[in-house]
Amino acid sequence: MDKRLMNGLEALLRGAYEASVGVVVSSVELPPVEGVRVVRADSRAALEYAMGASVAGVRCLAVVDDLSAATLSLLSHVGVEASLVVAMVAEQEAPYLDVRALACSAHLPILLPSSVYECKTFTKISCNISEKYDTPVFVELDRALVDTTMEVEILPPKVLKDKPYVRNEKKYVTLPSFARLCAEDKGIRDRRLVAECEQFPLYKIEHRDKRMGVVVGGAAYQALRVACPHVSTFCLGLAYPLPMGLLRMFAASVEEVLVFEEGEAVIEQKLRAEGITCHGADVFPLHMHYSPDDIRERITGLAAPGDEGLPVRTAAFCGGCGLIEVFETLKRKGCVVHAAKDCGRLAANIPMAHLDTAMLPNPMAFAAGFSATHASVCVLSAEAFLANAAQLALPHDGLKVVVYGKEPDDVVARAASYGRPAVCCEPSGLGALLDGADDLIFVHLALPCV
């Protein structure tokens, strides 16, 4: 039996390869994988590309880090031709995006792998569910799984041909009369999923201490097992639809049901709506990520020893990072700064404390930032800026824009498209460059961390 050491993303791609997925389109950096063609695009374009491939009969996997509600609604309404799996890489830095809540509202199945091994197996199961029930399927990939490695069994891929293209205007032409037919099909699909979801091999039910049973899903299951190995657990591999029959039997076998969710109380609300007595949001407030010590203290009341009185370490730039000098220069000159680079958000913390906006993605660093009238605005961005620059309006005179990317040639090409100068400089030369700029400039900063 051949096994390889993989992280969550590699296991996800291996599962796609073994399921005969023909195209992978991604908005995040992916490791190379044999036999699968990878297309890079932003999140919205990735979903649209995957939908087009599915309609054409090609099994597709879209790996994204952001979601469009309009595209989700469209995917849910029309369904698929060949299998379409959307893997959402959940970011701990973006707790405002709860994929489970979005998938439930769109009536799309969502799978929650709790280990690297399940990243591979759940991807293969998702492809089967997608084609059997004529629906896109979500797989939520927690950042902890991306950063974890384990041995994964390597199996030969299925040999499946692409589906032949067949025109189906009643499904893919959204005229009102056709849309009503799609809505009826969607209702039939939902009822089938609810009736048959308990047969999916996606759940781990572990009976231990009868006093408490915890319903959990995804990578949070691993932290719970470390923190409280004595409690009974129901690990959900599928967050929508929920296997209510199995959950009722689990609830009847324990005295207290606790729902552990890192995000909106989606599962807790659905359990209560079905008459299952449970709680969870009172113990685990929304939009937090919990360490095993946090979980143990909240469930058992036992605090981790030795943590009393320790100072809280504020996230800061790495020692010697070129961004330190960049932001010190911008702060000294009083520039308004909109950052779209991950590390740039650290400038909001003390001692730097000089940053106006930093979102992922940051609309201020794209179109809105360019239409600002403040002459001292500096937009710090990465390759995402270059990919979206075609959507930008021509900047106002006097706006100073600093762009740092991986390839200086990209900055030069983008500057040329606007008829503006492009230069490359060290962080130490940024101040003089800003002082001497009378008009918009595109700058590639020579940063060792990029």
Image (tube, rainbow, N blue to C red):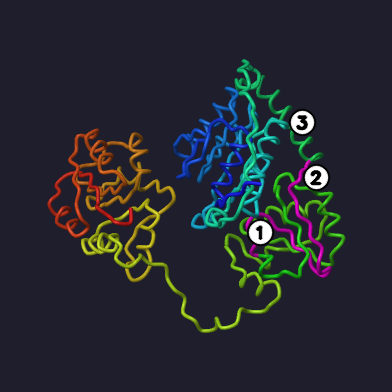
Question: In what element is the residue under mark 1?
Answer: loop
Give amino acid for label 3. Ile
Q: Are marks 1 and 2 in contact (CB under 8 Å)?
A: no
Examine the structure image and report whether residue 70 is included in the region drawn in magenta: no
Q: CA distance from mark 3 to mark 2?
A: 17 Å
Q: Amino acid at mark 1?
A: Glu
What type is the residue that disc 2 sits on? Glu
Residue neighbourhood size for the residue with mark 1, other residues' Cα within 10 Å, grouped as few (<14), some (14–19), many (≥20): many
Whether residue 213 is in magenta: the answer is: yes
**Mark positioned earlier in the residue sequence (3 or 2):** 3
Rounded to the nearest angstrom, the CA distance separating label 1 from label 2 is 21 Å
Residue hosting label 2: 198
Percent across and percent down for residue 342 are 40, 55
Measuring 27% from the left and 52% from the top, which residue is drawn there?
378
Q: Which residue is at a point 80% across and 39% down the rendered structure image?
A: 196
Q: Secondary structure at mark 3?
A: helix
Q: Quadrant of residue 281?
A: bottom right
Q: Nearer the viewer, residue 175 or 263?
A: 263
In contact (CB < 8 Å): disc 3 and disc 2: no
Of pointers 1 and 2, the one earlier in the residue sequence: 2
Q: Which residues are drawn in magenta?
A: 197-223
Labelled disc at residue 188: 3
Residue at (59, 66) in percent of width and height: 290
- Sort mark 3 into few (<14), some (14-19) or many (20+) by Cα contacts within 10 Å: few
Residue placed most toward the observer, 128 or 295: 128
Looking at the image, is mark 1 or mark 2 nearer the viewer? 2
Measured Cα–Cα span from mark 1 to mark 3: 29 Å
Image check: 424 left or right of 178?
Answer: left
Residue furthest left in the image:
436
- Where is residue 413? Give x, y as percent: 25, 36
Q: Nearer the viewer, mark 3 or mark 2?
A: 2
Q: Which mark is residue 165?
A: none
